[in-house]
Amino acid sequence: MKLIIDMNLPPDGVEALAQEGLEAIHWSEVGDPRAADRVIMDWARSNGCVVFTHDLDFGALLAHSHADGPSVIQVRIQNVMPWYLKDRILQVLLQHESELESGALDTVDESRARMRVLPIG
């Protein structure tokens, strides 16, 4: 599973995830840092990536559009430093791998992860 890390998360996340054997790229490496969320979603879908973000707009876009992809992991945790998020995200990826590969929205906070299969609605 490949991840595209949104601009609102640090680029260091790429290395932190790579150390765990995961493929990730930061949006700043492939697209315009000021790109609209829809552009990032389209790129993720075309390139088979799961969007990893701290922006709740991605979930709203999925709900409004009734799209079946791309999958999105949105964190609702204040500390977004890779060393802090890494273990929590790895847990979510393991628990919900098949759903994320098929199309899901995973909302992750300090105590739990809530997964919704796409399309929403």
Image (cartoon, rainbow, N blue to C red):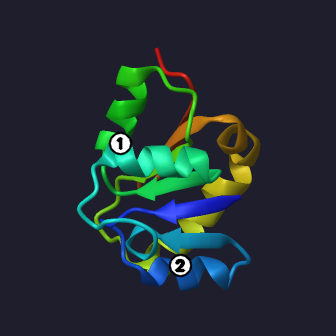
Residue type highlighted by circle 1: Arg
The quarter of the displayed image where residue 65 is located = top left
Picture coordinates of residue 40 (x, y %)? 41, 52
* Badge number at residue 38: 1
* Vertical side of 19 occupied by 99: above or below: above
Q: Is residue 8 left or right of residue 120?
A: left
Q: Position of residue 17 (x, y in %)?
A: 60, 76
10 Å crowding of disc 2: few (<14), some (14-19), many (20+): some
* Residue at horizontal 40 percent and vertical 57 percent from the top: 53
Q: Secondary structure at mark 1?
A: helix
Determine which of the numbered discs, if any, sits on residue 14 in the image.
Answer: 2
Q: Residue 42: horizontal and vertical position, in percent?
A: 47, 44
Q: Which residue is rendered at x = 56% and y = 85% of the image?
A: 15
Q: Quadrant of the N terminus?
A: bottom right
Quadrant of res 16: bottom right
Q: Earlier in the sequence, mark 1 or mark 2?
A: 2
Q: Spatial distance from mark 1 to mark 2, Cα to Cα?
A: 22 Å
Q: Nearer the viewer, residue 69 or 22?
A: 69
Residue visible at 30% across and 51% down? Answer: 55
Name the amino acid, label 2. Val
Most distant residue in the left direction: 34
Task: Report the label total.
Answer: 2
**In the figure, 116 relative to 87: above or below?**
above
View extreme (top): residue: 121
Examine the rendering and report whether any part of residue 107 can be seen: no
Q: Residue at x 46, y 14 (%)?
A: 121
Residue 71, placed above or below residue 4: above
In the picture, measured across the screen, residue 10 lies left or right of residue 112, that is left
For numbered disc 2, what is the local secondary structure? Answer: helix
* Residue 64 at x, y percent in the picture: 35, 22
Please tell me which residue lies in front, 51 or 116.
51
